[in-house]
Amino acid sequence: MHVLVIGAGPSGTRCAERIAGHGGARVTLVGAEPALPYDRVSLSKLLLGAAPGALVTHDMPALERLGIRYLSGTAIASIDRAARAAFTAAGERLAYDRLVLATGSQAVRLPLPGAHLHGVVPYRDLADIGVMRRACRLGGPAVVIGGGLLGLEVAVALAGLGMEVTVLHAVGWPMERQLDREAGLLLTRYLESRGVRFVMPAKTAAVLGDGAAEAVLLGDGTKLPARLVVMSVGVRPEVSLARAAGLPVNRGILVDDAMRTEDPAVYAVGECAEHRGAVCGLVAPAFAQAEAAAAAIRGEAAAYVPRTDAAALKVSGVSVWSAGEIAATDAESIVRRDEGLGHYRRLLLRDGRLVGAVLYGDTADAGLYFDLIISGRPVSAFRGALALGGAFLPGNGMADDLKDAA
Amino acid sequence: MDGSQPVAAATRTTCPYCGVGCGVLARPANGADFRDGTLIAGDPAHPANGGRLCSKGTALGETVGLEGRLLHPEVRGRRASWAAALDAVAEGFRRARAERGPEGVALYVSGQLLTEDYYAANKFAKGFLGTANIDSNSRLCMASAVAGHRRAFGEDIVPGIYEDLEQADLVVLVGSNLAWCHPVVFQRLVAAKAARPGMRVVVIDPRRTATCEGADLHLPLRPGSDVALFNALLLHLHDSGRADPAWVAANTTGLDAALAAARADAAGAAPTGLDPADLATFLDWFAATPRTVTLWSQGTNQSSAGADKVNAIINCHLLTGRIGRPGMGPFSITGQPNAMGGREVGALANMLAGHLEWDRPDEAALLRGYWGAPNLATTPGMKAVEMFRALAAGKLGALWVMATNPAVSLPEAEGVREALARAPFLVVSDCTRESDTADLAHVRLPALAWGEKSGTVTNSERVISRQRGFLPWPGDARPDWWIVAQVARRLGWGEAFAWTGPADLFREHAALTGLGRAAGPHGGGAAHRLFDISGLAALSDAGYDAMPPTRWPCPAGTGGGLAGDPLAGTVAEVAPAARAVPAGPVLPAATGTSLDGVVAVSVLAAPAASATAPRAVPLAVPLATTPGGRRAPTPRSAAAAAPTAPFGAPAAPGGGRLLAQGPARFVPTPFRAPRNATSAEYPLALLTGRVRDQWHTMTRTGLAPRLMAHIPEPFLAIHPEGAAAIPGGLAEGSLARLASRFGEGVLRVRLDPGQGRGSVFVPMHWTDRFAPRGRVNPAVNAEVDPVSGQPELKHTPVRVEPWRARWHGFLLARTRLGTDLADWTAALPVAAPPSADCVWRHELAGEDAPEAAFERLRAPLAVPGSCWLTLEDPAGGLFRAVLLREARLEAVLFLGTEPALPPREWLAGLFAAAAIDGPTRAALLAGRLADGPPPSPLVCVCNGVSVAAIEAACAKGARSVDAVGAATRAGTSCGSCRPEISRMLAAMAVPA
């Protein structure tokens, strides 16, 4: 059996790794970038000067040992499902018995006037990093559009490299999908202390410049000088191949619990897949999907079970962690703060159960809360001690707090 | 300490708390002066305590700071010179007296005053203002005992001495939580019982108090039913042939009427509600035990039938002739350090002075002449409750309150407070600025406090002891007698108030007690007064300074040897001459003469005869100076060797006791139920009283953190079944509203199986300064005994219901933040100034939204450079905040919707930490370290031993109070906590 995996990102590579060598399966892994499979999550390290090889997860000998045929710098142009074959841009035919689509996502480029100017880049791949590093050598003002995790990561890196960085964010606080307002503002204050300016909420109107970016124009008329403009405003599932191949596509490629598309020979994993209406954006569920698809292809009963998202993030030295429903307006909140240390945590409860948590500064109890969120265990009996952390919960010498909660 | 080290001389003085009157040695902590604090020890040579002190006395050194003191005169809220303040007082009284006559002015004074101060105030009022409107807070304490004594003995006589308790075979404690209220006497009793296990102790009290630990029988009678019990006892003694007919015939009158009255009570002992078997046991024990002492205190006195209760008790002792002999007698123990002194100088509205009586006109004339006071009041004045009703009714134009806090301590206190607030002219002289009454005064006069003032006090066994000053006079503070004299001088009576010092006053007082003696027993009633200390009237200043504890009577010719002994230092010594005075009879041996109903009483030196004459013998063991300069207790002679050597002939076993030898009077005491009966609307009887480590309105004990630790909040004790029967139920630790027809209070619930099912107990200590809603006296009825005028503090019909606070909490801070923080607040010091780590604990509860309260309470706490740690769970009703500045704890605020909150002790202890470390910081909002044992409340405040430590000792095999003491030191100092340890042991005992 020959399995073709299109996309050498984390989920595609993981899937290939789990299939190769099982039951005599042969695996071909195809990557569009001219590089070995690398850890995209750690791109910012490269920006900060890490050697390009440092992010590589599988070098050629390792791939060979696994029995994976790896084709780098190879863009796939089309798929012929009836013929069970894919065709590279160069016209090469790659036949398959099973096809895994792991095409990932594309960075969104805002359709702004001036978005095409030199010095305006997304933050997605190795090439983007190259543009940024060149800009940093000249120094000067930079604007990062988008205050999500990646945007902040690149902003801090750029500031560390001497750029005068301003982050523009459409919402009142950064990382609003992972952080509540208070944690977001704590993060803002912290990053400001690291030299990053914020304009929030901000509406970007245009990038101004003559050939190369010179400034960013805001909706309110403010002009922010910028030699480098990084767009980090989200990603869009890369589904063009699948759509062209006639596979059902919504936001992502529709799959069942085994990560199989409508075509039993074709699977989709990672950011390009849409499972039960959800498209994942983090590496952990992408890996889980890859495992599920690999098992199914190996002929085992397999099902991907979506897990509650947990985002453990390290932003420039600050530990941040969140999981579950962090914006649920019908949930009860327990908030704990240490202003002096800049620690903050919010726990969200519904019906006596933990449904979400945001930890800022001290994430030591993340495991405890994650366990409580995904297990749905009742917490009413020790609610009073819940925000104090594991050391204070029953069984850890805090039995009397049960009385407080009772 | 090395014996070669010089030790600073101790000042020998007397404790300012209860009526036991313990001797105290005060030493400077640094060995030289008192700037670095005061070391307190019991005086081994004092006859009352033989070196023991209770928890309150032991903590005296913590209460002599200047925190909260009134240090300068104030007129209408502004600091004034003494001249201006005294002018204002004189003018206020002059005007009120001019406008309304002598009856339009009044003084309300205190058992905290020294005898000399008391004397000055009484002379000022009765002799010169011309009004007997001077009453004392002793009215609340032992007026019924006084009335009972006067009815039975014709004079206010306590026949017995403490030694009787040790020599008795049966001690009956009536309405006395001796273990908590008179701990040193209780410890003497416990020690005696341990030495003689055959001795029996019976406690008669509606509550099972700490005093019941180790007692042989507890009779939980219904509140106010004592008379029915003692009437039943009288009949039982009579009917079972236990009367001593010969003695009764020779020494008493009125038996038939008393028996008839007792028989007329058809219900007999039924009103007591006692188990018949228990009752029978008590009757049999009493009947069978000649050496019986019946000791009573406020549970007896504070009643609308208080005087009858006292006489019902005395009747039983008269019937059996058990009085005035070793190990026998009725014994009133007083609550205040100098209630007895006040009685002696007559500073009560219905007494004259020196046991002289209005209804014996020759005595009033004697006093008028002695004082040179033509305007001497001619009739008794208003007693306390009456006085404040008159104030409320606008009948008083000027009132002077000395050293007491009637806004808190009187029944129906809200009305008293309003009356004080509306008083046309209110003067308060006190050592504290922090009293609810002082807040309302027009003129505030700073008086000296304990440790500063100098004079005498008399304890419950008639021993006069010196209180000596050892601290400098702070600010402008002055002795009370000086203040009185200065006002008198301004009113034109300077000559009669020209004392040079307390010794001068004492001599005048002592001489007064000898008035009319020369006339002889038939020359007038005055001659029959047993109270006679004229033997001390010639004391020199030095002799007064050195006066050892001396039991009265001390008639002329017996104590003169105390005079003229110039002695160095402050240690009392007695010249050999004191014992060289020839013995001479005080009164003729046969004094059984009744003059128009006047009951003659005489000294009995020996049980069977009075031939042995008493003489003055010092009761203290003088301190001898050793060659190294160290003073150590050394008996001066065999006669003075025993610390408890009684007044009178030391060799005589009956010495020092007084016996009604002329006809003492039986008083008929028909049973009367408490004035206000319980009802469907107010089904419970409220009893008020003291707790172990507090004193009165806490102006002094409230300064000592360790005394606040035992019981930090005002509480209501109720039987668990009674609590369960209340609609909505009352949970341990919740708050309850107590309401009567008169007022209300809100108190912490303590479920106590020792509480009677029909009654509740609330301590009377808390004030506006400590817990405004925890004041109980607004709810207490102001019914009084028709004879003694003492209010019925031990029976008010009340209703108790849950007080539904929306939140409970506590706030720890480095300063006292007041008592208006929340709807219910109780403030107490945890570590007091001048400690750098001063911490105040505020227990809180509120009816407002907890979120709002949390914000409101936090807002004023933040200071520059500080940061908060917070935990907020609005839906769960939990709010906690900790304020840090540079890693030091500044404040802690915990709120919750339930009363149960983490213990305060660990958090409070962290205020002393120079820097809060990481693990501690992480635990602050939990209120304890993650792996630490929960802090545990203190039981032994002297040695800082907690419940947990005692439980641990028990777990390791300690099975007795002494074994616990050996393991933990608990109960080994003052012993006040020994009953509690005993109860803990009993509760932990596992059946084999």
Image (cartoon, rainbow, N blue to C red):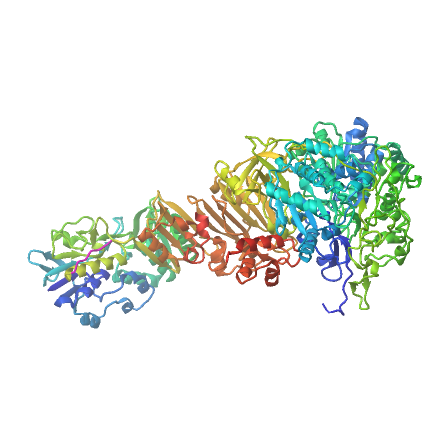
Residue B631 x, y percent position in the rendering:
79, 63
Q: Is residue B601 left or right of residue B956?
A: right
| Residue at x 12% of width, y 68% of height | A24
Residue B88 x, y percent position in the rendering:
78, 36
Query: In the depicted view, which residue is nearer to us: A89 or B503?
Result: B503
Q: Seen from this angle, which residue lies furthest left?
A: A83
Which residues are the magenta region? A300-305
Q: With respect to residue B745, does B460 lie above or below?
A: below
| Residue at x 72% of width, y 27% of height | B394
Quarter containing the N terminus of chain B: bottom right
Query: In the depicted view, which residue is nearer to us: A199 or B818?
Result: B818
Label the magenta part by its dominant secondary structure. Answer: loop
Q: Is residue A307 left or right of residue B153?
A: left
| Residue at x 31% of width, y 64% of height | A46
Asked if residue A241 is among those painted magenta in the image, a careful observer would answer: no
Q: Quadrant of residue B508?
A: top right
Query: In the depicted view, which residue is nearer to us: B333 or B907?
Result: B333
Q: Quadrant of residue A11?
A: bottom left
Would residue B703 be visible to someone looking at this image? yes
Q: Seen from this angle, which residue lies furthest right?
A: B518
Q: With respect to residue B445, does B5 lie above or below?
A: below
Residue A127 x, y percent position in the rendering:
25, 62
Query: In the depicted view, which residue is nearer to us: A40 or B201?
Result: B201
Tally the numbered discs.
0
Residue A178 x, y percent position in the rendering:
34, 52
Q: With respect to residue A68, does B367 lie above or below?
A: above
Q: With respect to residue B329, does A299 lie above or below?
A: below
